[in-house]
Image (spheres, helix red, strand yellow):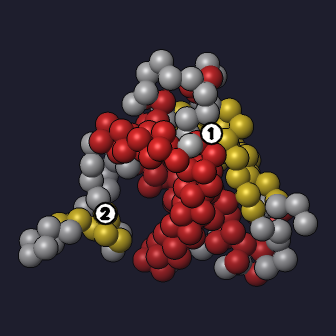
Amino acid sequence: MQPQLPIDVDPATGVWTTDALPMLYVPRHFFTNNHTAVEEALGRDVYAEILYKAGYKSAYHWCAKEAEKHGIAGMAVFEHYLKRLSQRGWGLFTIREADPATARAKIELRHSSFVLAQPGKEGKLCYMFAGWFAGAMDWVNDTTEGGKNAPRARSTEVQCAAEGHPHCVFEVSPIAA
């Protein structure tokens, strides 16, 4: 994968944009150090819930903006989302299974930025991504005719490379009624 992202820098403001969305560019260690400091201060469960909600909202917004910018729809937007995440250094994301009508998907993550930035740390380190996949799946279903009756999605990290697995796995599934 060649990370050929369109990055524009406004000479008057210094604001970076990619695909018309304002971006921040920070070193991985800076982001991870801040992430782990907040996790330690709040506790993992509280922080994970906050990140899930924020990530869900952000993914939903991103999908809407990118669909409009590129004239794409449905699962093509979800696939584009994972491509862009991969190009931005979060890791290499691949959809292994997807059925939007049932709000189900399986996403594989190789070379997670959280695992790479915390060598020797064990456990599920990549939980921050979970809300992103549920938000993207709900956007797909909310914007496609066939998805209008689909259940709402939830997502969980079911396997992490920091547990000794070859890669991380996230499962998207319907929220129980």
**Counting residues from the N terminus, which is met first, the one under dot 1 or under dot 2?**
2
In the rendering, at what x and y percent does residue 120 appear? 48, 18
| Residue 128 visible in this rendered orientation of the protein | no
Give me the C-alpha separation between circle 1 and circle 2: 25 Å
Q: Amino acid at mark 2?
A: Met
Query: Residue at 70% of width from left, 52% of height from top?
Result: 155
Q: Residue beneath label 2, please? A: 23
Q: Which residue is mark 1?
A: 108
Q: From the viewer's perspective, is 75 left or right of 150?
A: left
Q: Residue furthest left?
A: 12
Q: Is residue 101 left or right of residue 22?
A: right
Residue at x-position 41% and y-position 41%: 37
SS of the residue under disc 2:
strand
The answer to whether residue 105 shows anywhere in this view is yes
The residue nearer to you, when weighing 121 against 46, is: 46
Q: Residue at x 78, y 74 (%)?
A: 147
What residue occupies the far front of the structure in this picture?
41
Residue 161 falls in which quadrant of the image?
Answer: top right
Task: Between residue 156 and residue 21, name the one nearer to us.
Answer: 156
Identified at 78% across, 68% down, the residue is 152
Image location (x, y in percent) of residue 100: 76, 63
Image quarter where the C terminus lies is bottom right
Crowding around mark 2 (Cα neighbors within 10 Å: few <14, some 14 to 19, many 20+) is: some
x%, y% of residue 51?
55, 55
Is residue 90 or residue 35 the one in the foreground? 35
In the rendered image, residue 94, in percent from the top left (x then y), is placed at: 59, 44
- Residue 117's place in the image compared with 70, above or below, is above
Tag 1 secondary structure: strand
